[in-house]
Image: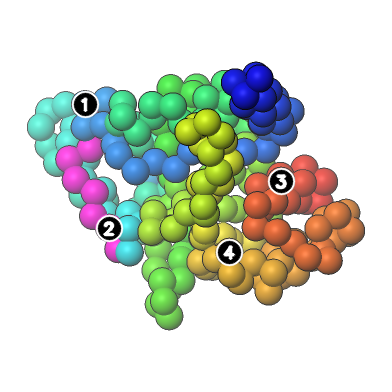
Amino acid sequence: MKFKSITSVMVMLFATQLVFGQVFSPPAEGFSRKKPAYVTLEDGTEVTGTIDKLKRKKGLISNIIIEKESGEALDYTPDQVKFMYLPQSGLDKLGKGLDFLNDATKWNRDDLDAAKIKDGYAYFEKADVMVKKKKMPLMMQLLNPSFSGKVRVYHDPYAAETTQVSVGGIGVAGGDDKSYYVKKGDGVAFKLEKKNFEDEFAKLFGDCDSIKKAYGKKPKWKDIQAIAYKHATECN
C-alpha cells in the first residue's frame, strides 16, 4: 500500500508537469568542448567552433574564446556578440528538462533555433546587467525562450535552491532556484531573489490585470514560472 501511494503521488506530479508546460529551460552549468558552439555577432556574422575557454564575472559569461577548425582562437566579449548556442556537457544534460526539450519542437519562434535546444544546446543572449552597483554587458542564459515577452528570465549561476521534498527517497518537489536575473522590456537586468519577489512583483507583472487578479494579493515564488508564462501569453 505504501509503494502504491508513493507511485500515485509521483504519477500525479508527473502529470501536472505535462499539463503545465510553462517550465523554464534547465540551467546549463557544464559545456562540451567537443561539440560545436554557434556564436552570432552583432554584425550578423556566424562563427562556429569549439569552446576553448569561458571567462566569468559573478558566475556570468564575460568572454568566450572559440577555437575554429583551423586552430585559430577567437576571443569575443559580449559587446561583440548578439546571441549564441553553447553545447551542454553530457553529464549536465542527463535527466534535465526532458519535457521542456520535447516541447521545443512546438515553438513558433523565428528568432530561436528549437532544433539546437532540443539537441541539448543552451541559448545565451547579450543583456545589460546590474552586478552590485555596476552595469555591464554579459552573456545570459535565457530560461524562458519559448515564452519570453516583455519579461525575460535569466539563470543565476550562484542561486541557492529551495528545500527539496522527497517521497520514498525520490525528490518530487522543491529544489528550485531562489534567484534569477530578470529584465523587463528594454530595461537593465537585475537580480530577483525569492525574499524580494513580493516587493518586485508589481514592477514586473503589475501591468497585467489577469495576473494581478490571480496572484497579486500575495505572490508566491513557486509560481514564478506560471506567472511569467501567463504574462507572455496573455499580457504582451
Determine contact: label 3, label 4, CB under 8 Å.
no
Q: Which residue is mark 3?
A: 226
Placement of the N terminus among the 4 image quadrants: top right
Residues at marks 1 and 4, CA–CA distance in whole angstroms: 36 Å
Q: Element type at marker 4?
A: helix
The image position of residue 204, as x and y in percent, is: 69, 64
The image position of residue 232, as x and y in percent, is: 73, 47
Q: Nearer the viewer, residue 223 or 81?
A: 223
Asked if residue 79 lies in the magenta stretch, the reply is no
Is residue 166 visible in this depiction of the protein? yes
Earlier in the chain: of badge 2 and badge 1, it is 1
Q: Which residue is mark 1?
A: 34
Say whether residue 130 is left or right of residue 31: right
Q: Main secondary structure of the magenta part?
A: strand
Say whether residue 119 is left or right of residue 174: left
Q: Nearer the viewer, residue 79 or 201?
A: 201
The span shown in magenta is 47-57
Local packing at callout 3 (Cα closer than 10 Å; few below 14, some 14-19, many 20+) is some
Earlier in the chain: of badge 3 and badge 4, it is 4
Looking at the rendered structure, the kind of residue marked 4 is Lys
